[in-house]
Image: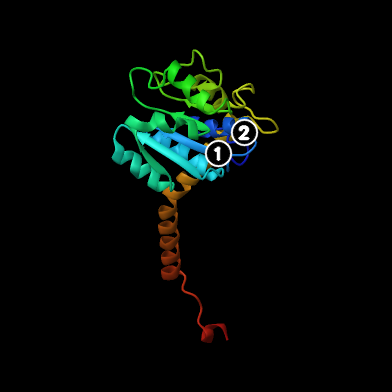
Amino acid sequence: MRTETGIASSAVSVSFAAVELARKIFDRLDDKAVMIIGAGEMCELAARHFVSNGVTRVLVTNRTFERAEKLAAEFQGRAVPFEQFTEHLASVDIILTSTGAPTFILGQKQMEEVLRRRKNRPMFLIDIAVPRDIDRRSISSTTSISTMSTTCRGGAGQPQGTSEGSAPREAIVGEEIGQFHLWLANLEVKPTIVALRKRFEDICARNWPRPSATTRS
């Protein structure tokens, strides 16, 4: 399906979509610093995508510092104690947060102070937490999980079963399922066919022995 259709041509995960959006906002990522807030699977995937796209400065923070250290070490990054992470926000260009906090971990006043310290240099904040980690009331550059979902869908405007220039996906699946069942049926009867063939050959050998070289002469 991935080979014959465009099913894999769009972003396939929220973390991948985050990187795609970052690439649209910044001309390049190799000179950008990223802070990952949280050390779960989504954050790990996001860090992996950022690093594979050239990011070399990765900061990781988590309420459990050991988990932050482990994730940071995997990407040659730096672990930051959760109690101190706001002190480092002004030095990063991209923030991706995905924690299980019941309330905002970054409020309006905190972010206004961070932007002031950055002298209004561009900053991309990606909030994929549910509920949200960042209060967006005064931040126009924050992207939430709803935007991520739209990016992940990518070609959702195309018909459900088709992709541009490809056959309907259901037809491809149906054809392959048929081929598989045929292969499976042949696999199941093959030992029986082999046994029958050997049996027939044994019967023939007993009843109609091959003529010897002397008989033929």
Q: Work out which quarter of the rendered image holds the C terminus and state it.
A: bottom right
Amino acid type of the residue tagged 2 in the rendering:
Phe
Per the rendering, the mark at residue 32 is: 1
Going by the image, does 70 lie left or right of 19?
left
Q: How many badges with numbers are in the image?
A: 2
Residue 39 image point, x, y percent: 37, 35
Numbered tag placed on residue 26 in the rendering? 2
For label 1, the crowd category at 10 Å Cα-Cα, with few meaning under 14, some 14 to 19 and many 20 or more, is some
Is 217 on the left or on the right of 106, as rendered? right
Residue 146 point in image, percent of width and height: 51, 19
Instruction: Report the front residue among 92 and 119.
Output: 119
Secondary element type, mark 1:
loop
First along the sequence among labels 1 and 2: 2
Task: Measure the alpha-carbon separation of dots 1 and 2.
Answer: 9 Å
Residue depicted at x 44% and y 54%:
193
> Along the line of sight, which residue is nearer the eye, 171 or 199?
171
Q: Is residue 41 above or below residue 201?
A: above
Amino acid type, residue under disc 1 in the picture: Lys
Q: Are marks 1 and 2 in contact (CB under 8 Å)?
A: yes
The x, y position of residue 189, in whole percent, is 43, 49
Q: Which residue lies furthest to the right in this view?
A: 165
Colouring mode (rainbow / by chain / secondary structure / one colour) = rainbow
Give left or right: position of 70 versus 135: left
Q: Which of 144 and 142 is in front in this view?
A: 142
**Mark 2, secondary structure of its residue:** loop
